[in-house]
Amino acid sequence: MDKPRDNKEFCPYCNANLQGKDIPEKIRHHYGSATQGSRKIAIYSREEDRTLKWQCPDCGGEWERE
């Protein structure tokens, strides 16, 4: 049996927990294998059609997407 992944994420600036609420089991199929949401805010580029950065909802810090 696979070991459960620790999917907790933290802001690199203020260390806030960015793990969101549980995704209800009946709609998880819409989110791939995710069981929880994220509080990170995506900084999206229409020109590049992708997320470029993330932003913390607590402190406003931004960091590059890996």
Image (cartoon, helix red, strand yellow):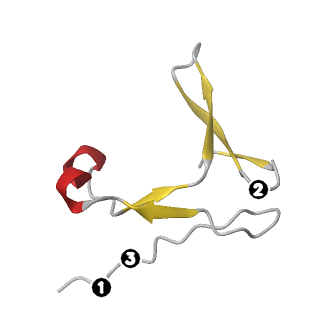
Q: Are marks 1 and 3 in contact (CB under 8 Å)?
A: yes
How packed mark 1 is, by other alpha carbons closer than 10 Å (few <14, some 14-19, many 20 or more), is few
Local secondary structure at mark 1: loop
N-terminal-most mark, 3 or 2: 3
Local secondary structure at mark 3: loop
Residue where numbered disc 2 is placed = 58
Q: Are marks 3 and 2 in contact (CB under 8 Å)?
A: no
How packed mark 3 is, by other alpha carbons closer than 10 Å (few <14, some 14-19, many 20 or more), is few
Q: Residue at image x 82%, y 55%? A: 59
N-terminal-most mark, 1 or 2: 1
| 5 displayed left or right of 58 | left
Residue 62 locus on image (x, y percent): 77, 46
Which residue is at the far top?
47
Q: Residue at image x 22%, y 50%? A: 27
Residue 35: image quadrant is: bottom left
Q: Which amino acid does the dot numbered 3 rest on?
A: Arg
